Image: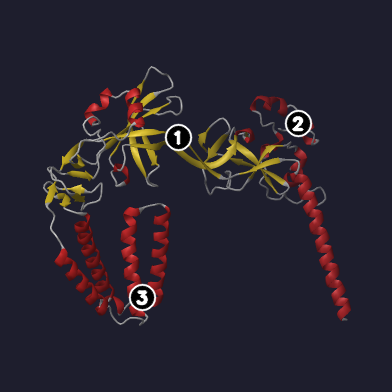
Amino acid sequence: MMNTVTVRILVFLLSLFILITVFSQISMQFKDRYVTETAVMYSSAEKVSFQGVYIRNESVIRGGTTGVLSYPNADGSKIANGSAVAYVYRSENDIYTDHRIEQLKEERELLESAQNPGTTEVAEPKFISSLIDDEYQTIAVLIAENDLEDLEKERRQLQTLMDIYHIVINEETDFNDAISSLDSEISSLEAKRKDPVNVITADSTGYFISHTDGYEGTLSFDSIGSLTVDKIKEIINDPDKSSSSGTVGKMVDGYEWKMAGIIDPKSADFKVGSSITVKFTSTPDTVTATIEDIVDSDDPNESLIIISCDELTFDLVQRRVERVELILNDYEGIRVPRSAIRFDKDNQKGVYILLGQRIAFKKIETVYECDEYILSKATSDTAYVSIYDDIITEGEISADLYAEETEPAEDEGSPPEETYIADDVKEETSRTDRETDEESTEETESGDDELWE
């Protein structure tokens, strides 16, 4: 009895394997008749890359006192009139002592925050552990992107979370001993601390930059009208002229900046007043800017472009010259080869796709087009081309491919199966040949009519 059951199972499995193999061979033979391209999401944009020269309204800040400078604010920080922009010390040791005191006070503050009963008594170890993991990933990303501006803030947050975790899991009861040790070191350093010999303040409100390059007096908004292609080339070749001694830094009047560069006017359809996206080599961030002017030169391949923006950050004030990429008309959609595009009897644009051993017509909604392809809007409507559809780019479609699904069976008289195949598959998809195809009905019914290649 057991042997009989085993034999039946083996026969069933063998039969199933044979059926699958036969079906696969038939499907492959059918599919080999066509060349297809899988529909995928794709983006297309007009882009131009060039060396850009920053233009800002800047005023130089001078020191007048010899010594070592210490800056209390990061570049790009907004400074009020009369606020300190730099401290002058006699030696670097005095600056180190001052910075070390600030670091120790910060560590003390973090420890006091971590052992706050209002936090540790309600915190769950699992929750704190998940926050630590998230913070670790954030720091890893910042390091990879070389984002030092936010790295220190996230480091402090990670340290606080780890200190809280140690108390929550009872590895530490408090940090009183560590706080006392910090207080002792702070007191020792403060006894050696020396006040700066001079404090340099801002004489106007603006955004501070701790370095100068010698172009502060020549590159301003008022000077844009006199800029030429040759002048921009000169600045690009020498982006850091020697500046006069005694300078502490400079103030930028407002957060607006402009940039000048040289482009090929035929490289993209840039127009004055157009909004563009700007990418930089110095930062992963992008900004939105406006094309303010495009000035032709004697060389038809070179035009001077001026863009303006009102977003100012630390990275955007670190240099005078930087390579940038301007992005205009950024489109996204499903990529459809232009050679695959056909029209149905209602003059609707679309493509034929392969569905197993069937052919279906799907419409497209164009959002962008070029010589090689078009981008169709991604939609949930199944009447339109979808991601991962197999778009037929080469092959012949004739009536015998759809007759079995569109006509009732002769012996059963049952209604036809529901099918995705278009009613117009019998037509020649080239609109110029439709009248000829309508006169060839008999050839179409015989299955010999060639619809399109």
Which is in the foreground here, disc 3 or disc 1? 3
Give amino acid for label 2.
Thr
Q: Where is residue 440 in the image (x, y as percent from the top left)?
A: 76, 28
Which is in the foreground here, disc 2 or disc 3? 3
Residue 217's disc number: none
Residue 165's disc number: 3
Give amino acid for label 1.
Lys
Q: Is residue 79 above or below residue 258?
A: below
| Extreme residue in the top direction | 298
Residue 407 in view here? no
Residue 441's disc number: 2
Give amino acid for label 3.
Tyr
Label 1: state its secondary structure: strand
Total labels: the figure holds: 3
Residue 214 in view here? yes
Q: Where is residue 108 in the image (x, y as percent from the top left)?
A: 24, 70
Q: Residue at x 33, y 73 (%)?
A: 163
Structural crowding at the residue carrying mark 1, measured as other residues with C-alpha within 10 Å and reported as few (<14), some (14–19) or many (≥20): some
Structural crowding at the residue carrying mark 2, measured as other residues with C-alpha within 10 Å and reported as few (<14), some (14–19) or many (≥20): few
